Image (spheres, rainbow, N blue to C red):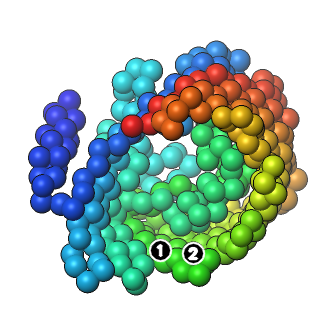
Amino acid sequence: MKKSLIAFAALATIAGAASAQSSVTLYGRVDLSVGKYAGTDAKTMTNGSGSRFGVRGVEDLGGGMSAFFNIEHRFNADTGAQTNGAIPASSTSNAAPGGRFWFGRSLVGLQGSFGKISLGREYTTAFLQSQLAADPWGWDTVVSQQGSLNDKLTGGLIARVRNDSSVTYNFSAAGFSVGAQIAEATDTISNFQKRPVNFAVNYAAGPFSVGVAHERTGEVAADKANWTTLTGTFNLGMVKLGALYGDGNTAAGADHKSYMLTAVAPMGQGEFRASYGRLKDETNNITAAKGLALGYHYALSKRTTLYTDYVRNTALADNKTGYDFGIKHNF
């Protein structure tokens, strides 16, 4: 409780100093749905895309350069509880005592004609510009959460979502976008054998886009855990088609390969989403995920969306299907 009060006091101080910045924005999302995840028969209320609130700001430094910051808290809107934010048990990192309050992002940086450089806790460039971008659900809802389906297909059960104590660089020009990141192997939370590193390169021209991304997670045992993805999209107007291919190795030395095909079509004030794919452990001849997902997300306004999704993962032993009906409001 004391830590939360301190964090909120800091938030109030930042908001009170808004006049010293070019701009400071308080933003957030509340997203809840009813349904069930694949792999379980429990019907429950779920946090469809992760409820959150955050603060971001930009200060004009002159000469085309500016400073920026972003801190973001995650919580479960059904109970008001803080999202844990501990390092996953599958990682070689130490668990964060009590979890992180600023779980989503916690960074500061500079930007200008040279690009954008940030320091702190940030998404990997491979995740943000390839794995997340390739999934029509953006790793949200029952389709992608809790190891359901699309998070496995795009991340290969290898990729990391964020890195602590990282330095991230992004640059865009003439249709190209490039991102690269390196993080500390060890800090007060993380304890990897190697420094996590990742990069992504994308090119878009008209209705067509292609990209490649690679990351080394920092986990090392029999092998260095790594994951590479190739992506592409083509917008036909009536429907946007996409594809992803992934290949990499776990720290245990298992070779994972995946593919995913997607389609997104505008329908009225909403859009229809569909995907199909498979993830296979080639070394041990195990299908880790295989199936399809369907969904329709209807925009009541620019900020409020009603949605329903269906997912089926035939690689699960039982309870192969999941579904949800939800509402999402951004502010």
In percent of the image, x 24 and y 57: which residue is there? Answer: 23
Can you give x and y, in whole percent of width and height, for residue 93 in the image?
45, 55
Report helix, strand or loop for mark 1.
Answer: strand
282 up-or-down from 15: above or below: below
For residue 55, say whether it is visible. yes
Can you give x and y, in whole percent of width and height, for residue 209 in the image?
72, 69
Answer few, some or many: residues within 10 Å of disc 2's Cα (few below 14, many 20 plus, some between 14 and 19): some
**191 relative position to 48: left or right:** left
In percent of the image, x 51 and y 46: which residue is there? Answer: 88
Q: Are marks 2 and 1 in contact (CB under 8 Å)?
A: yes
Q: Which mark is residue 170?
A: 1
Answer few, some or many: residues within 10 Å of disc 1's Cα (few below 14, many 20 plus, some between 14 and 19): some
**318 relative position to 50: left or right:** right
How much space separates mark 2 and mark 1, taking CA atoms?
7 Å
Q: Amino acid at mark 1?
A: Asn
Q: Amino acid at mark 2?
A: Ser
146 up-or-down from 188: above or below: above
The one nearer the camera, 152 or 54, is: 54
Dot 2 corresponds to which residue?
A: 177
For residue 37, say whether it is visible. no
